[in-house]
Image (tube, rainbow, N blue to C red):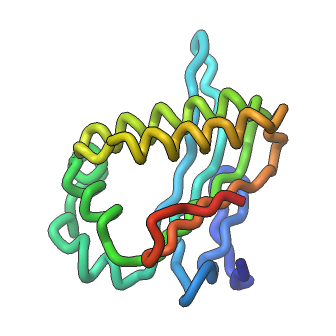
């Protein structure tokens, strides 16, 4: 995966503005952090960058233009339009706070399963894929600070690649 020199800082983690994963350059169109609150302590776990073909915004997400964050992210229709858009997707996850691989895998499985179930896309095939993903992270004792995990979803494939 190649990247441009320009970056955006997300919680002190640099994300390149563009990456090339498969056939064409993808742009950083979304970013954020995952966190957890334990006994009033706010702990940031990972920084995340989502890369897509910028044409997705103009061709598949126009109905959400100008809407607020809550309207977009609390709307299953937005998620459905995003995951069904015919584009390559790369999600880069950078560890901020060291975490056990097994904990990360279970959290990831739960979040993905819940989101897919909400849009009625969670069936036997998805369950098997999530089990494999969870097993992949079981083999990692700890994901150390600054570890990079890349999920690549080619538009022309029915599977993802994890690096």
Relative depth, front residue between 6 and 59: 59
Q: Position of residue 13 (x, y in %)?
A: 72, 57
* Residue sitting at the far left: 63
Q: Which residue corresponds to the image point at 70% horizontal and 42% vertical from the top-left? A: 136
Closer to the camera, 77 or 68?
A: 77
Vertical placement of residue 47 versus 140, above or below: below
| Position of residue 33 in the picture relative to residue 87 (left or right) | right
Q: Is residue 92 above or below residue 76?
A: below
Q: Does residue 159 sit above or below 143 in this rendering?
A: below
Q: Residue at x 20, y 64 (%)?
A: 64
Q: Is residue 151 left or right of residue 27?
A: right
Give left or right: position of 88 versus 151: left
User: Between 23 and 59, which is closer to the camera in this rendering?
Assistant: 23
Q: Position of residue 26 (x, y in %)?
A: 53, 80
**Residue 67 versus residue 130: which sits nearer the camera?**
130
Q: Position of residue 124 (x, y in %)?
A: 38, 40
Image quadrant in which the N terminus is located: bottom right
Q: Residue 39: image x %, image y %?
A: 60, 10
Q: Which residue appears at 35% of the width and 84% of the height?
A: 55
Compared across the picture, whether 127 is left or right of 43 comes to left
Q: From the image, which quarter does the C terminus lie in?
A: bottom right
């Amino acid at each position: 995966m190649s990247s441009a020199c320009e970056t955006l800082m997300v919680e002190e983690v640099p994300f390149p503005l563009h990456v090339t994963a498969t056939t064409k350059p993808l742009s950083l169109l979304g970013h954020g952090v995952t966190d957890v609150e334990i006994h009033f302590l706010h702990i940031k776990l990972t920084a995340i960058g989502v890369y897509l073909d910028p044409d997705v915004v103009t061709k598949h997400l126009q109905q959400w233009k100008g809407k607020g964050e809550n309207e977009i992210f609390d709307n299953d229709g937005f998620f459905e339009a995003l995951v069904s858009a015919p584009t390559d997707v790369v999600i880069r996850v950078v560890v901020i706070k060291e975490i056990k691989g097994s904990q990360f895998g279970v959290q990831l499985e739960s979040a993905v399963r819940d989101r897919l179930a909400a849009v009625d896309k969670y069936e036997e095939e998805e369950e098997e894929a999530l089990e494999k993903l969870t097993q992949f992270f079981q083999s990692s004792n700890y994901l150390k600070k600054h570890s990079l995990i890349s999920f690549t979803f080619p538009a022309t494939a029915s599977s993802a690649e994890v690096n």
